[in-house]
Amino acid sequence: MSAIIPETRASRMAHLKQRISNISLNFYGILGYLFLYTPIVIVVIFSFNDSRSTAQWAGFTTHWYVDMITDSQIIISLWNSLFVAIVSTIISTIIGTLAAMGMERYRFRGQLGMDALLYLPVIIPDIAMAIMLLLFFNLSGIGFEVWNVNIFGINLAVPYSVIIGHVAFNIAFVAIVVRARLSQMDRTLEEAAQDLYANTWETFRKVTLPMMMPGILGGALLAFTLSLDDFAITFFTSGAGFNTLPVRVFGMIKKGVTPKINAISTLMLAMSLILISFSLISRKRGGEDQSIEMF
Amino acid sequence: MIDGFAVELRQVVKKFGQVTAVDKVDLQIRDGEFFSMLGPSGCGKTTSLRMIAGFEMPTSGQVFIGGEPQGYLPPYQRPVNTVFQHYALFPHMSVYQNIAFGMEMQKVDKNEIQQRVGETLEMVHLSGMDNRRPKQLSGGQQQRVALARALVNRPKVLLLDEPLGALDLKLRKAMQVELKILQDQVGITFIYVTHDQEEALAMSDRIAVMNQGKVHQLGTPEEIYEAPANRFVADFIGESNFVPGVMQKMGPPAEISVTGTEQPIAVEWLEDGINAGDAVVVSVRPEKIRIHPMGQAPTYPAMCRLSGQVEKVIYLGTDTRYLVRLNEESAVVVRLQNIISGGGHFNEGEKVDIRWDSAHARVFKE
Ligand SMILES: Nc1ncnc2c1ncn2[C@@H]1O[C@H](COP(=O)(O)OP(=O)(O)OP(=O)(O)O)[C@@H](O)[C@H]1O
Ligand SMILES: [Mg+2]
């Protein structure tokens, strides 16, 4: 009997320790979330604050949102943001996917160097990238032409330099995500397709591409988000008079933080949330499918 | 078909950089045959199969399918289909889509596709699983889908690379039987790669035993078991005793003096290239040897007899294994069937005579 008691006591102690550590883990977890989300919650709340002051609550209003959507400058910059994001996402997804396939599928001289070069835009600070691009456009003189588009009656004038700049940094992110996906793909699947009379193109279309799709979508979503989010590169490469939403907000903030900026921030937050839910849903739906689960 | 062979390899060599994976292999695989390539890991089985399928191109030599030289034809232009070791089912397609894939690529009529997929599913006992995803199937079921996906195309030749390798033993045995029955049914030539000799012996019409890129012997299961061509084959297939000795007399009758004994023994079959005075090994299967109490072995002509002492007795249910030590250097394993219950006819430490018919011994280079 006596031999058993210390054991139970020991196991009880272990149990207790486990619980304490669980509780403290939860505590730190909650602290972490508080730290992350308190500022966001404050921004959202104060976007509904019926006062010019951003320090004191003075009742609920949607006034700032009305203000926001009737400000044609903001609307134009929002469309600019979306237009740049969509165009640069499409281009960088195609180029990034091809780059990923090239790097993953072929062995060639200087591959390590190419790898490093591809990852460079991910590692170097935005500001450095922005300055490099600015220098490039200045020296080469290309890119400052403007793409005139009309969306729902709103005229946009988007400099090619901004789109090129966004494509330049997005390619790297797309390539990395797609490549991760490709490296996990079983090559014998492609052999199986070829064995079943699919030629090179059919193999790509029927097997490789569908298998890569989660990676491509993930990469595109990442590119879209980064592009919407970008400030430095747009700011440096756009020249005067062209604003995306973040650049516009930066301009407004110089005159002081107003609840209208809170409203814009809330709008951007909402857009991010929608994008995140998209990616979560697409992952979940893919859950039945081993190919997508690996992503 | 010009020469009547389903597949033929002529002087095929495959090098990967410095490694010679397949070394001047000649094979002629007959129409409708269940042909196995058997050998230890890395001997070049998969590489040979991949060259037939068109996934690898020979460094030199030629592969013929149905008498036609394949040259550098890509896999999708060869009339063969493959069952991959890990099945390689398309995870983003249903069972039906997987099986229909080959026919769709060949632009087979929709109705015919539907009919053939149905028939093939029935053949592999998977009817009603059309809409499942590969991930929703067990290993054995996935195996059947892989088989169906290949067979449905009615290829001239089916290539199988260790198709049962990922299954547990029991399922493996069941699938062996099923595969064999299926092959009889469809009458397609099967080329089957395995490193499991029992599997190869049980299923094949003929077996090519390979090692280090070379074919060491090609024959029926009985031929390669009963009459191994060299020491590697004797060692790799089943169990063999190797008793060292020296070639005394080339004969006939040829004679060998077993190391550590005085009396020479007679042998009938010698590997090519053995000369008098060479060091050799006499190879005898454990079940071909008889044991007698010392001095009681009967003497016939063509009977080889050696004396020794029982060192170890292992009772194995259907039979008993005796390790009989002949001298310092050599011992032989003898296997006796337990026809009469009780097993232990001889005890450890007992002095015994062993004998075998000289027709059952094969002499290989040391
Ligand atoms: N793509 C390749 N590149 C370099 N070497 C290779 C390649 N494929 C095979 N080899 C080498 O060729 C030899 C034969 O390989 P192979 O895969 O044909 O063996 P195997 O008989 O199928 O073996 P296992 O039973 O292990 O599957 C091995 O030494 C292997 O390392
Ligand atoms: Mg292999």
Image: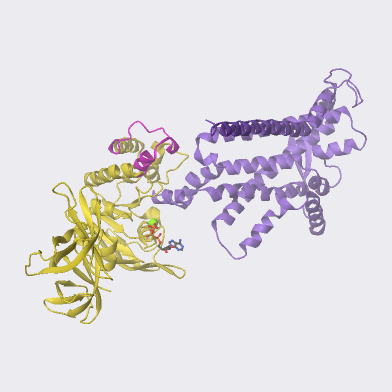
Residue at image coords 29%, 61%: B236
Give the side of residue A284 with respect to residue A244, left or right: left
- Write down the region rendered in magenta: B122-146
Residue B272 image offset from top left, x and y in percent: 22, 75
Q: Nearer the viewer, residue B347 or B224?
A: B347
Give the side of residue A168 with respect to residue B14, left or right: right
Q: Color used for chain B?
A: yellow
Quadrant where ligand 2 appears: bottom left
Q: Nearer the viewer, residue B366 or A235?
A: B366
Residue A60 image offset from top left, x and y in percent: 84, 18
- Asked if the stretch drawn in magenta spans residue B136, the answer is yes
Colour purple belongs to chain: A
Give the side of residue A52 with respect to residue B255, left or right: right
Q: Nearer the viewer, residue B362 or A274?
A: B362
Q: Is residue A112 above or below residue A239?
A: below
**Where on the picture, by quarter, is residue A255?**
top right
